[in-house]
Image (cartoon, rainbow, N blue to C red):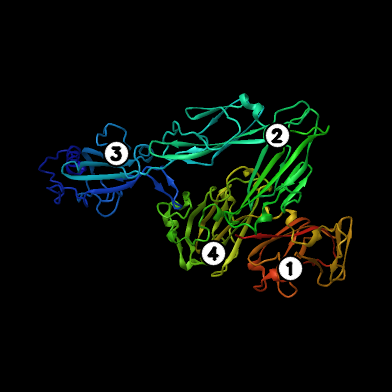
Amino acid sequence: MNMFKKTALCAAILVGIVGCTDEDYKGPQNTKTENTTPTHGGDIVINVNEVQYDDDNNPSFNGSPHFFLMGTPTGEATGDGMAIDADGDFLSVKNVTYKVTDSSDPDFDETNNFGLELADGNTMLVVSLEKLRLQLDSGQTRTIEYNYEITDGVESLPRKLTVTVTGEDFEPVAEEDINVTYSKASTAESIDLLEGIADFDGELLNVKAGSLQQVSTNDFELPVTLEGNTLKVDVASIKDQIPNEQYVAFNYTYVVMDHNHEVSRDLTIGLLGVEPQPGEPFFANYFLEENLTENSNATTVDLTVDVFDDDGEVSVKDVKFNGGAEMPKGIMLDGNMVTIVPATYSSDLQVGDEEEIVIDFKIEDESGNEAQGRRTLTVKIKGENNNLLVANGFNADFEDVAKVGDVAPNGNTNGFTFPWPHNDQNGCPVNRIQGESARTGDFGFRMEGNYCANVIDGTKFIKNLATDDKYLVSYWLRSEEIEAGGNGNPYVVVYGNYWTGSRFTDETLNVWNEVTSTVDGSSDAFTPYVGQALAFNMGKYAGNGKHDLDDFTLIRYSAFTHSSLDLLVNDYGTFENSEAIDNDAGSAEIADGKLKVNTTGAASGVTLTMPLEAGMVKANQYYVVTFDIENTTSDDDSTYTVKLTNGTESIIWSGAVPDGSAELIINEEIARTANVDWSAESMSLELTLSNADTEYNLDNVRVYAVPKM
C-alpha cells in the first residue's frame, strides 16, 4: 500500500525542516482526499486437463500450470481484466477461503494434499499434475473455489477463482509379450510377470489372482506356481521329459491390472532339450536376434558368441538360411561371422514392412565334437523413412497443417525446443510456418531477426552417435534480406558445442540453395560425442536477416556405402579383375592392383569410363562417389569431374581433392543436366582427372545410391 506518499512523506519533511510547523507546510495542493477501490474484469474460471499433450500428441504429467488471483479472468498474469488500482497503490490478496468438490469422492478430505496449492503470497495458484495423476480417472473432476479479497490496504474488492481439473486415466501398456527359454541345465527359475509393462499414471500394478491360464496342449505338465507377481518355474523336476535336442513351448495368458483397467498378456516358456556334456561345446542362448532398420549400418554378428568349450576353438557348420542353402541378398558369411547389410532391402520395404531372415546352424569344436541342437539367428529388418527426422516424428517438411502458424516456446513448437537466444522475442520477431515460405509442398518455415534458436533435440535428431555413423544433414534456404558483414545467413549448429556452428556463405538473395554438412563419428570433430545424442540448432546469431527454410533432412548415409552396394559392375573400380580400361586420352593401365593414370599430352585431362549396373541410377537420390587418389607428380590437389551419364545428359560434379580417400556427396536434383528417368537409361561413370602432365595412382572407385525417403 502506498502509505508513504500519503502520510509518512509529510512527517519526514516536517521533521527535517528547522522551525517548520504544520501550518507552514501544507504539502502539494493536489493531494488526494479519497482512496479509489481496486477493480478487476470479473471472476476467474479455468478448466484444466490433468494430462498435457505436446505438439506430437504425446501425453505428459510434467509441469505445473499456474494462474494468478489478481490476473485476467482466464488466470493470465497480465492483460485485459487484470486487477488494477487507479491510485497506483500496491495490491495484495487477503481473507482467502476455499472449498473443494471432488466428483469421485463426495466426502473428499480437504486436508489432503489435493494437488492445488497457493504460492507467492497467495497471489498464484499452482496445479500439480504429478500429484493429481494418481487421484483422478477419466471423466472425474476436482474443483476448487477460492473466495478472497483484493485490497490496496484500505479498500477491498471481492473476487472468486474457480479451477476445475478433469482427470484422464491410462491403462497399463506392455512393450511386448514375455518369451523365455530354459535348457535341461536349468533348475528353479523365476519370471517377473510385470517386466516390460508400465502404467502411465504411475498406478500400482498387479497380476490378477487366478488369471494365469495355460493355452497350449503339451505332452507333459510344467510345474509353475504364481506368487504375487512372480511365476516360479520348476524345470529340474521334469527335465527328463524334455525330448533331447527338441524345443517345447508352453503358452500362457494372464491379466495385469491397475485399479481401473485390466489388460491381457501372453507368456511363452520354452524348454530346450540340451544340457552340458563333457567335451561338447555348450551355450545357454540358442536363439540369437538382431533387430535392424533398412537404414542401420552394416552389422556383423559372431555366431559363436558365448559358446564355451574345453577343447579350444569352435566353428559353425551346416548353415541354413530360411531352411535352405541359398544365402539371401544382404547376407555374407565369413567363417563364424555373418554380416548383414540392411540397406540391401531399402527398395523392397515400405515404412513399417519387415523382412525376416532365419539362419540356423550347428556348432562344433576343433576335435569334431558337436553341440547339442541347432542355434538360430533371427534377423529382422524393418522399413523406415530414410529421412531420420521424419522417422523420429519431426515435421521436417513443415507440411503438418496442424502446426501452421507462429512457432514459439509457449504454444505451437513444431517439435523445436528453445534455448536462451530465443527468449528475447525482440531478437526473433518472426518464427512461423507459412505458405509463402514453401519450396516444395504447401508450407515452409520463416525466420526473421538476429537472435533465434530453433533446436531439434536428440530424441528427433541423432539419438546415439556411433563411431561408424556418417550422417548427411541438409536444409534448403532462401534469404530475402541479409545484414552486410558476413553474419546475415542463419547460424546452424550440430551440437556438440554451440560455438562450432556454420553459416551458408552465399548471400545471393531470393534463390533457393541446399545447405549440407556431414557428421562423421570417426572424425576428430565428433569423436568426443560418440555414445551421445546430438541436437540441431537452426538459429540466428549476431546478424539480422529474413529467411525462408524448407525440407530439412537427416540421412545416415553410412548405411548405404557398404562395398556390396557398389553400383559399378563387378567391383570394376577395385582394378583387381583385369578390367579393360576405357580412357579417352593419355594413358591408363593397371599395375600393382591400382590404376596408373598419366595426363601427359591430354589437353583436357584423362576421362575414365566405367559401367554402372542397369536400372540402379534413379532420380531424386543422393549419390556418394568414393575413390583413393595419389598425385605422384606434385603436391597439388587433384582436380576432377564426376559424371553419371547416359552419354547425352548427366549428373555432374566437379572439384579438387588432396591425396588420400575422397568422398563426394551429390544431390541428383541439383547436379543433373536434365530431368531424366535414369533407371531406363544405360549409365556409366565418367571420372575425369584434369591436372596437366600429371601421374596418378587411382584405386577403390565406388558409386553408391542413397535414397532420400
Task: Please identify, in this view, whether the residue under mark 4 or under mark 3 is nearer the observer.
Answer: 3
- Amino acid found under the numbered disc labelled 4: Ala
Q: Evaluate if marks 4 and 3 touch, with contact meaning CB atoms under 8 Å apart.
A: no
On residue 643, the disc is: 1
Quadrant where the C terminus lies? bottom right
* Amino acid marked by disc 2: Glu
- The disc placed on residue 484 is 4
Along the horizontal axis of the image, is 537 left or right of 324? left
Q: Secondary structure at mark 3?
A: loop
Sequence-wise, the earlier of marks 2 and 4 is 2
Instruction: Indicate the amino acid at tag 1.
Output: Lys
As drawn, is 430 to the left or to the right of 220?
A: left
Quadrant for the N terminus, please.
top left
Question: Dot 1: within a 10 Å radius of its alpha carbon, few (fewer than 14), some, or many (20 or more) residues?
Answer: many
Residue sticking out furthest to the left: 23
The residue that label 3 is drawn on is: 104
In terms of sequence position, does the residue under pointer 4 or pointer 3 come before the other? 3
The residue under label 2 is 245
Q: Which of label 4 and label 1 is nearer to you?
A: 1
| SS for dot 4 | loop
Say which amino acid is labelled 3.
Ser
Residue 588 at x, y percent in the picture: 87, 65
Within 10 Å of disc 3 (Cα), the crowding (few <14, some 14-19, many 20+) is some
Spatial CA span between label 2 and label 3: 58 Å
Report how far apart the C-alphas of labels 4 and 1 lie in the structure: 37 Å
Q: Earlier in the sequence, mark 1 or mark 3?
A: 3
Above or below residue 102? Residue 326 is below
Whole-Å distance between the Cαs marked 4 and 3?
64 Å
Identified at 56% across, 54% down, the residue is 391
Secondary element at tag 2:
loop
